[in-house]
């Protein structure tokens, strides 16, 4: 839900779309953004670092055709110790 909320907020702020919503909000839509979270973790092997991988597809809602897809990866070092440092890195 956190990833979904952040993506919706980013699309809304871009101003590039007439309407942006999450499932259940009752919008008539042309496209869906389908996000698969493949990795969302803190790794401790080889130095502590956060790792996030998302696989994103743009789906035509009218005919089910996948218009585009891409994998996004990011890593960030953990600065400090404890849970708050892990959250900040993610």
Image: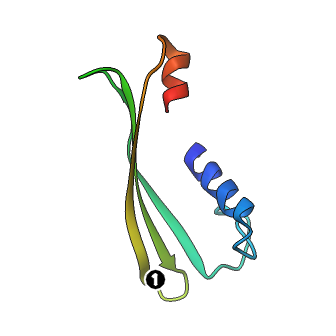
* Residue 51 in the image: above or below residue 81: below
Q: Residue furthest left?
A: 46
* Residue 86 in the image: above or below residue 18: above
**Which of 23/68 is in front?**
68
Question: How many numbered discs?
Answer: 1
Query: Which residue is pictured at 66% across the width and 79% down the height?
Result: 29
Determine whether, in the image, residue 21 is placed left or right of residue 50.
right
> In which image quadrant can residue 9 be found?
bottom right
Position of residue 74 measured from the top left corner of the image (x, y, whole percent): 40, 44
Query: Which residue is pictured at 60% across the width and 55% down the height?
Result: 7
Position of residue 72 measured from the top left corner of the image (x, y, whole percent): 40, 55
Determine whether, in the image, residue 27 is placed left or right of residue 73.
right
Position of residue 82 measured from the top left corner of the image (x, y, whole percent): 49, 11
Dot 1 falls on a residue whose secondary structure is loop
Residue highlighted by disc 1: 64
Determine whether, in the image, residue 14 is placed left or right of residue 73.
right
> In which image quadrant can residue 2 be found?
top right
Query: Which residue is pictured at 46% across the width and 83% down the height?
Result: 64
- Label 1: how many residues lie within 10 Å, few (<14), some (14-19) or many (20+)? few
* Residue 21 in the image: above or below residue 73: below
Q: Residue furthest bottom?
A: 63
**Which of 84/29 is in front?**
84
Position of residue 44 measured from the top left corner of the image (x, y, whole percent): 30, 21
Q: What colour scheme has been applied to the protein in the rendered image?
A: rainbow
């Amino acid at each position: 839900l956190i990833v979904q909320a952040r993506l919706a907020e980013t699309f809304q702020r871009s101003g590039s779309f007439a309407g942006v919503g999450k499932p259940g909000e009752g919008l008539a839509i042309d496209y869906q953004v389908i996000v698969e979270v493949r990795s969302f973790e803190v790794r401790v092997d080889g130095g502590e670092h956060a790792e996030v991988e998302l696989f994103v597809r743009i789906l035509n809602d009218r005919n089910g055709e996948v218009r585009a897809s891409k994998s996004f990866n990011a890593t960030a070092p953990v600065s400090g110790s404890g849970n708050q440092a892990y959250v900040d890195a993610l």
